[in-house]
Amino acid sequence: MTDALPLWPLPRHAERLGGTIARAPLAVSRDPSLPAQGFVLDTADTPTLRAADDAGERYGRAAFAQLEAAQTKVGAEMDAGALPRLRIEDHPDFPVRGWMLDVSRDRVPTRETLAMMLDWMDALRLNHLQLYTEHTFAYREHETVWRDASPITADDVHWLDAACAERGIELCANQNLFGHMARWLSHDAYRSRAEAPEGWKTRFGFTVPASGSADAARDTARVRTLRCPRSARGRSRAP
């Protein structure tokens, strides 16, 4: 039962054993018999955590921290210096749980905002972030495209990659190429790549600027030539 427990996300199994124990350091061990990213948190006698791997340990520690921070009722009034006696088991149904963040709609987040988003992901146990860009990454040889867009820079991506790693999140670049390319194709240097360089008229009578690529094979080859500034090379997964 998980009702009234100060845990979020709720675990797949929680057993209330009644009463409380004095707070004590958490004893952590590995248990390869558990499902991937799984953990068992037991506070029957002394706080112990068995985790399948690093991710399981991270999630188990987070659950324990919630118990320690709780000022709530679990059956009876819980003393601030005590922990409820519980046994909690949890593991995810899907090994990869992700979120795609689109930063190409004229609201490019600051590092402060990105850090806040990563904390949300961490709390929700999401472990995969796709950073979706169209014209908002500062490619070294394409300043015309991103000049007025307050772009994500290579140093930003390097910082973001490290911040993701600290939270057990994999960062993956997602650069659109074949559609939604109006901010590229509006410039003379790139317009020849458009399927309809002069735009196209809708049935409602207004014209939509060029936004689709005419040659997928050519643009697939082109992406291999994109370069980010040298400062981002190394650990970063920037494009």
Image (spheres, rainbow, N blue to C red):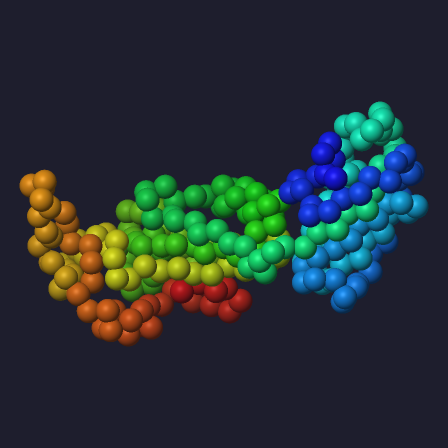
- Residue 101 vs 35, above or below: the answer is above
Residue 150 x, y percent position in the rendering: 35, 46
In the image, taking residue 131 as reference, residue 106 lies left or right, namely left
Question: Which residue is depicted at the point 73% across and 47% down?
Answer: 13
Image quadrant where one finds the C terminus: bottom left
- Occupied quadrant, residue 221: bottom left
Question: Which residue is depicted at the point 50% across and 45% down?
Answer: 114
Residue 104 x, y percent position in the rendering: 34, 48
Question: Which residue is depicted at the point 76% across and 33% down?
Answer: 70
Count of residue discs: 0
- Occupied quadrant, residue 119: top right
- Residue 199 vs 23, above or below: the answer is below
- Residue 102 vs 4, above or below: the answer is below
Depth check: give the residue in front, 164 or 200: 200
- Occupied quadrant, residue 34: bottom right
Image quadrant where one finds the N terminus: top right
Q: Is residue 162 visible?
A: no
Question: Which residue is depicted at the point 51% across and 54% down?
Answer: 98
- Residue 200 vs 194, above or below: the answer is above
Depth check: give the residue in front, 155 or 163: 163
In the image, taking residue 179 as reference, residue 71 lies left or right, namely right
Residue 10 x, y percent position in the rendering: 67, 42
Residue 84 x, y percent position in the rendering: 84, 37
In the image, taking residue 26 as reference, residue 141 lies left or right, namely left
In the image, taking residue 69 as reference, residue 163 lies left or right, namely left
Q: Is residue 125 visible?
A: yes
